[in-house]
Amino acid sequence: MGKLDGKVVLITGAASGIGRASAIRMAAEGAAVMCADIDISGARKTAATIAEDGSSAAAALQLDVANESDVQAALQTTVDELGGLDVIFNNAGIGGAGNGWDETIAINLSGVYHGLFHGAPFLAARGGGAIINTASIAGLVGLTGNPPAEQADLQPGAGAYVAAKHGVAGLTKQYAVTFGMHGVRVNAIAPGYIETPMTVLVREDEDVRRYIESLHPMGRLGQPEEIAAAAVFLASDDASFITGVVLPVDGGYTAR
Ligand SMILES: NC(=O)c1ccc[n+]([C@@H]2O[C@H](COP(=O)([O-])OP(=O)(O)OC[C@H]3O[C@@H](n4cnc5c(N)ncnc54)[C@H](O)[C@@H]3O)[C@@H](O)[C@H]2O)c1
C-alpha cells in the first residue's frame, strides 16, 4: 500500500530536478500525478516515465507559474484529466545567480502565491487537501555564497532569491493559519544545495563544490530524491496534524 494511494497531485516544475523526482516518487506511492512545467516536453517525459511503470496515472500540462491564469487553469485541468485534486506542490523556481529582481520575484514568489491564492480555496471547496511549497535554506537564512572570487557571480540574484524564499516561508505560515479550519494543510520544504540542473554551476568547479559541501554539516550536497521523500511525508495523512511548517531538508545547513 502506498502512502498516497487514491490522491491526485499537481506538481509545478515537474520537468526537472526536485519536481521530477517528486512526481516519480509520489506516483510510486500511489498518487496520480499532473506534471506541470513551462518546459512541456520535459513535463511529458516525466509523465511518460511514470506511465512506463504502469502503476499510476500521469499527465502533463504547460504553465508559466508567473502567469496567474495559467496556474488557476491548471487546477481544473488536473481535475478534468485525473479525476480530482488533493495535493498541490508549488515547486517551480529559478536559481539565484544571474537572474534579476523582477523575474526572480515573479517566478519564485508570485508563482507560489498564485498556487496558494487559487489553490487553497479550490482544495477547501473540494473538502480539503495539502499544499507544499518549495522554499529554501535561503528562506530561513541569508546565503553565505560562493568563495570570495565567485562572490560577484552571486550578485544581484542572491538578494532577490533570498527575499523571494523568505516570502514563500511567510506565505506558507499565513495560508496555514487562514485555511487551518478549512481542511487545507500548508507546509514548505527548505532544501539545502541539491544536485539538480539548477546547481550545475556550483558543482562544476571542484573548489566551489567542496566549499558549498563544507557549509552542510553532513559534508555533502543533497539528492532530489531526499526532497521528494519529505514531500511525500508532508502530502500524506502521516502529516495530518502538521501545518505551517517550513521544514529544512538541508544536511544541517541551517542548524548553525
Ligand atoms: N537545487 C537546489 O539546490 C535548491 C535548493 C533550494 C531550493 N530549491 C528550489 O527547488 C525548486 C526546484 O528547483 P530544482 O533544483 O529542481 O531546479 P531545476 O532547474 O532542476 O527545475 C526547476 C523546474 O522549474 C521549471 N520552471 C522554471 N520557471 C518556471 C515557470 N515560470 N513556470 C513553470 N515552470 C518553471 C523549469 O522548467 C524546471 O523544470 C525551485 O523552487 C528552487 O528554487 C532548489
Image: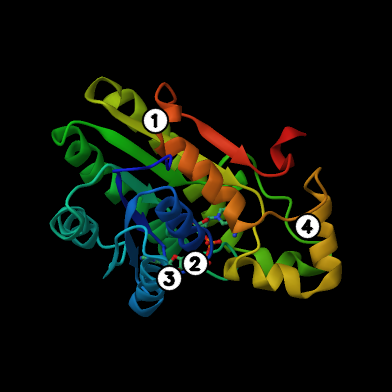
Neighbourhood count class around disc 1 (C-alpha, 10 Å): few under 14, some 14–19, many 20 upward: some
Left or right: where does residue 73 sit relative to residue 150?
left
Residue at image coords 18%, 31%: 127
Which residue of the protein is positioned furthest toward the bottom in this rendering? 41
Q: Nearer the viewer, residue 98 or 206?
A: 206
Give the percent coordinates (x, y) of residue 79.
16, 53
The CA distance from mark 2 to mark 3 is 34 Å
Q: Amino acid at mark 4?
A: Ile
Q: Amino acid at mark 3?
A: Thr
Q: Which residue is mark 2?
A: 100
Neighbourhood count class around disc 4 (C-alpha, 10 Å): few under 14, some 14–19, many 20 upward: many
Could you say which disc has been placed on residue 237 in the image? 1
Task: Work out which quarter of the rendered image holds the C terminus and state it.
Answer: top right
Give the percent coordinates (x, y) of residue 207.
86, 68
Q: Secondary structure at mark 2?
A: loop
Q: Which residue is mark 3?
A: 49
For discs 2 and 3, the disc positioned in front in the rendered view: 3
Give the percent coordinates (x, y) of residue 7.
30, 44
Q: Secondary structure at mark 1?
A: helix
Left or right: where does residue 144 sit relative to residue 181?
right
Q: Which residue is mark 4?
A: 212
Q: Nearer the viewer, residue 103 or 255?
A: 255
Q: For the residue with label 2, is its CB less than 8 Å from the closest atom of ligand 1?
A: no
Left or right: where does residue 191 sit relative to residue 148?
left
- Comes first in the chain, label 1 or label 3: 3
Neighbourhood count class around disc 2 (C-alpha, 10 Å): few under 14, some 14–19, many 20 upward: some
Q: For the residue with label 4, is its CB less than 8 Å from the closest atom of ligand 1?
A: no
